[in-house]
Amino acid sequence: EVQLVESGGVVVQPGGSLRLSCAASGFTFDDYAMHWVRQAPGKGLEWVSLISRDGYSIYYTDSVKGRFTISRDNSEDSLYLQMNSLRTDDTAFYYCAKGPTGNYFPYYFDYWGPGTLVTVSS
Amino acid sequence: AIWMTQSPTLLSASTGDRVSISCRVSQGISTYLAWYQQKPGKAPELLIYGASTLQSGVPSRFSGSGSVKDFTLTISRLQSEDFATYYCQQYYTFPPVFGQGTKLQIK
């Protein structure tokens, strides 16, 4: 059974930093691209970032470029999101999501973690 | 940038009803469209990809249709567990974009 479990969400002040983690199990982690998708409380879904199976192809939504860094450790079956210079509009549930293949395309999401809440507030 | 418009935003229906949700896209995307279901406090779950291919384990009362710019998610006989919010998502162009969601509530 595919399982994705995020951790690391906390309350942080504007301008602060945070690292989210996602532990994967139930599938061969290094065979698949992985994504972060976020959802502000009560709002819709927004794709944030993508990393290919080998970590060499990485993409971000414009609003987080230069502030967020996605990475993965295939030896640990783990995905990460380093979040710097956090803003109040980064407040959201952050979901780790699995892509259906190892390449960056197609970019839909066949399994999701339960999410972790990041609150950026003073 | 691609725009996704779902309608209606809010849909009231009863158990046993047949309902349809529309997703319109600002430019042609062939059939590179996915549908997700999200229940309160839970993560989204993939229902359909390729506009009409049912994800493994999804009940057959769910179906998807459409191509290019107009897509539809249909639930043939609503069950109590189907009351949730539904999102479409295009993956024809980068970045992937979601519709704003359709909340399906009990009438």
Image (spheres, coloured by chain):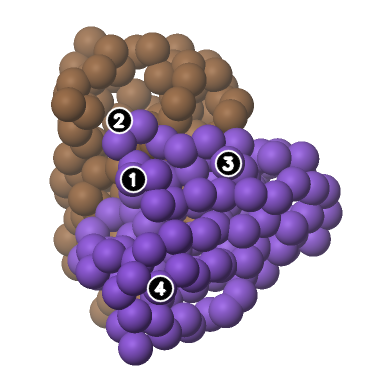
Chain colours: A brown, B purple
| Location of residue A114 with respect to B80 vertically, above or below | above
Instruction: Kindly identify the amino acid type of the residue bearing the numbered disc 4.
Output: Asp
In three-dimensional space, the C-alpha distance between marks 4 and 2, rounded to whole angstroms, equals 41 Å
- Which residue appears at 38% of the width and 12% of the height? A31
A120 left or right of A100 in image: left
Same chain for marks 1 and 4?
yes
Q: Which residue is mark 4?
A: B17
Same chain for marks 3 and 2?
no
Same chain for marks 3 and 4?
yes
B17 left or right of B74 in image: left
Chain of the residue that carries numbered disc 4 in the rendered image: B
Q: Are marks 1 and 4 in contact (CB under 8 Å)?
A: no
Tag in front: 3 or 2: 3
In three-dimensional space, the C-alpha distance between marks 3 and 2, rounded to whole angstroms, equals 30 Å
Q: Which residue is mark 2?
A: A79
Tag in front: 3 or 4: 4
Q: Earlier in the sequence, mark 3 or mark 4?
A: 4
Q: Position of residue A13 (x, y in %)?
A: 28, 69
Locate residue A2: give its quadrant. Answer: top left
Instruction: Kindly identify the amino acid type of the residue bearing the numbered disc 2.
Output: Leu
Instruction: Kindly identify the amino acid type of the residue bearing the numbered disc 3.
Output: Ser
